[in-house]
Image: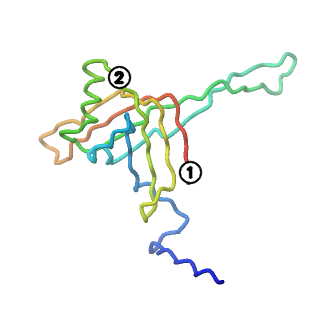
């Protein structure tokens, strides 16, 4: 019995099919099993997808050619999310509760990178994320620009997922 030939996927014109583009992504806030509000899925920019191992230098007695660098811990920067100014967002209510009432509700945040067929290629899961900074772009009567909210989250750990 012969297997049917695989269906070829369409190739983007003028692009290397191995090239992964960084503009198809989504952000999910996973808090208490609640379905995310569609307003809180779309962001114009995500940054801070990084981790770094800090090291301690240990000098060995009598050894002047090199030092030992021992791993100490993993450090993470803040996850930074940018989007257009949104009214009526549950995420804004969470940030407001943190900034005005000092009430924290850590949640997991999932950032997903998609391919041209909207299939997930990679993801970053941020555990126990909570707001640490919230800002809105300048309001300027001389500029014809969209108002942008920038949200920064600290988190305990980042898990990188590849499909």
Picture coordinates of residue 87 (x, y %)?
A: 18, 40
Image quadrant occupied by the C terminus? bottom right
Q: Residue at x 43, y 35 (%)?
A: 108
Residue at image point 56% right, 51% down: 162
| Residue positioned most to the left | 141
How far apart are the alpha carbons under marks 2 and 1? 30 Å
Q: How is the image coloured?
A: rainbow
Q: Residues within 10 Å of mark 1 (few under 14, many from 20)?
A: few
Give residue 105's position: percent from left, percent from top: 36, 26
Considering only vertical position in the picture, is 107 above or below 85? above
First of labels 2, 1 by sequence position: 2
What residue is disc 1 on? Answer: 162
Q: Is residue 64 left or right of residue 24?
A: right
Q: In front here: 4 or 74?
A: 4
- Direction from residue 132 to residue 123 in the image, left or right: right
Q: Quadrant of the N terminus?
A: bottom right
Q: Which residue is painted at 62% across and 25% down in the image?
A: 73
Taking 131 as reference, is 139 left or right?
Answer: left
Nearest the camera: 63 or 34? 34
SS at circle 2: loop
Q: Mark 2 sits on what residue?
A: 104
């Amino acid at each position: 019995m012969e297997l049917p030939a695989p269906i070829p996927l369409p190739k983007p014109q003028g692009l290397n099919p191995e090239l992964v583009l960084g503009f198809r992504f989504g952000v999910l806030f996973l808090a208490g099993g609640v379905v995310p509000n569609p307003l809180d899925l779309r962001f114009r920019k995500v940054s801070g997808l990084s981790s770094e191992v800090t090291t301690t230098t240990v000098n060995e007695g009598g050894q002047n050619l090199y030092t030992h660098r021992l791993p100490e811990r993993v450090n993470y920067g803040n996850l930074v999310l940018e989007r257009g100014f949104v009214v009526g967002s549950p995420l804004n209510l969470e940030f407001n509760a943190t900034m005005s009432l000092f009430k924290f509700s850590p949640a997991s945040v999932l950032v997903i990178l998609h391919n041209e067929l909207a299939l997930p290629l990679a993801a970053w899961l941020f555990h126990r994320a909570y707001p640490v900074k919230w800002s809105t772009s300048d309001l300027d009567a001389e500029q014809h620009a969209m108002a942008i909210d920038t949200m920064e989250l600290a988190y305990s750990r980042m898990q990188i997922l590849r499909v």
